[in-house]
Image (tube, grey):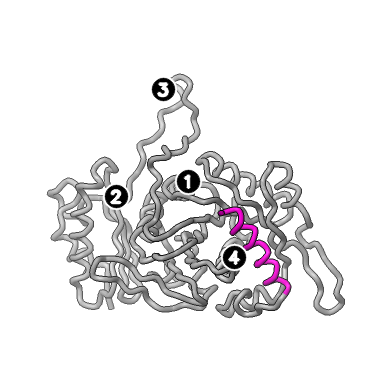
Amino acid sequence: MLTKKEIITALASVPGPDGKTPLPDSGALSDIMISGGRVVFSITADPAQSGRLEAMRLAAERAVKGIAGVDMALVTLTAERPAQPAASTRPSGQPARMRPGPAQARTPIVGVSHVIAVASGKGGVGKSTTAANLALALSGEGLRVGILDADIYGPSMPRLFGLKGRPEVTQTRVIRPLEAHGLKIMSMGFLVSEETAMVWRGPMVAGAVQQLLREVAWEPLDLLVVDMPPGTGDAQLTLAQSIVLAGAVIVSTPQDLALIDARRGVEMFRKVNAPILGIIENMSSFVCPNCGARHDIFGHGGARREATRIGVPFLGEIPLELALRESSDEGTPIVAARPDSPITAAYRDIARRVKEAVK
């Protein structure tokens, strides 16, 4: 079994960012994640020297791949932004909040025509389940679709799609995504076990997501669905600033508490000048399978009213249904498991609206 000691010993032959100090002693090495024959870690570096330090990253990757038992190594360069000046020293007129990055910093993903983000202001609203089923419904519209699970801390796509395999890495260091139901799928969950806790700071997460975006054989795709991490922190903002987005879909439940966070999600994408394709109300209502009575457990219609209030499209409602939970836990999203169900019809209606909005 691989150990961190073996990996650190191999990395001792690689000079760190200063070109002299061994990488393990440089203070730039993140925690090392090991899952079977897969090794994942990052190196903190000055962003101004990222081009020069690419050779160091490759050397670290080669050193780890040379260890017996290593099937795959994922090494990323991450950068800490300089701290913002305090209010007393901030230049006059400069706001305290982080400003959106310049438009020229965004670059397209090779072989991908359009990218949409599925996001929420908080966790627990069914964002990943929505992203998986929306991707399948978009595929049913005749599009070539992929899905990137960008939630490094809590990846859901391996479980939602029942996938347990390991991605292959080509000789040119490109990762081949796994496939299910006609979709290309990539997730950090394919590289680490479900029990592994990713104790990484924001810059490390952002670096890993960038590598999963740009070093994966996505092409050819008409549409890549990015299942964004929940919230509106540094990792989400960095991701939104670096991708050329066709738009964002916001997922919320109907109650006021969730809608407050959905507003923050909308505001984040507006700040980085990304179009809002619309809001989806998830867990909209529950119909008792025994008596047929409808129960608005989390309220009903809140997302529609909020969409009208802030001037963005309302894409549709997804009910709270036992079959949706069961199919997700079983590893077959409901759009694939029950193509004739009413809930699948709801996802397909939303997919048609998203497809038209992307056009």
Distance between the Cα atoms at labels 2 and 3? 27 Å
Rounded to the nearest angstrom, the CA distance separating label 1 from label 4 is: 23 Å
Q: What amino acid type should be assigned to the residue bearing mark 4?
A: Leu
Q: Which residue is mark 4?
A: 134
* SS category of the residue bearing label 3: loop
Q: Which residue matches tag 3?
A: 89
Query: Does residue 208 appear in the picture of this structure?
Result: no
Q: Residues within 10 Å of mark 3 (few under 14, many from 20)?
A: few
Of callouts 1 and 3, which one flags the residue occurring earlier in the amino acid sequence? 3
Mark 1 vs mark 3, CA separation in Å: 25 Å
The residue nearer to you, when weighing 88 against 107, is 107
Q: Earlier in the sequence, mark 2 or mark 1?
A: 2
Of residues 333 and 184, the one drawn nearer to the viewer in this rendering:
184
Disc ID at residue 237: 1
User: Which one is closest to the eye, mark 1 or mark 4?
Assistant: 4
Q: Amino acid at mark 3?
A: Thr
| Residue 4 visible in rendering | yes
Q: Position of residue 101 (x, y in %)?
A: 43, 39
Name the spot of residue 150 as percent of width and height, x first: 46, 59
Which mark is first along the chain, 3 or 2?
2
The image quadrant where one finds the N terminus is: bottom left
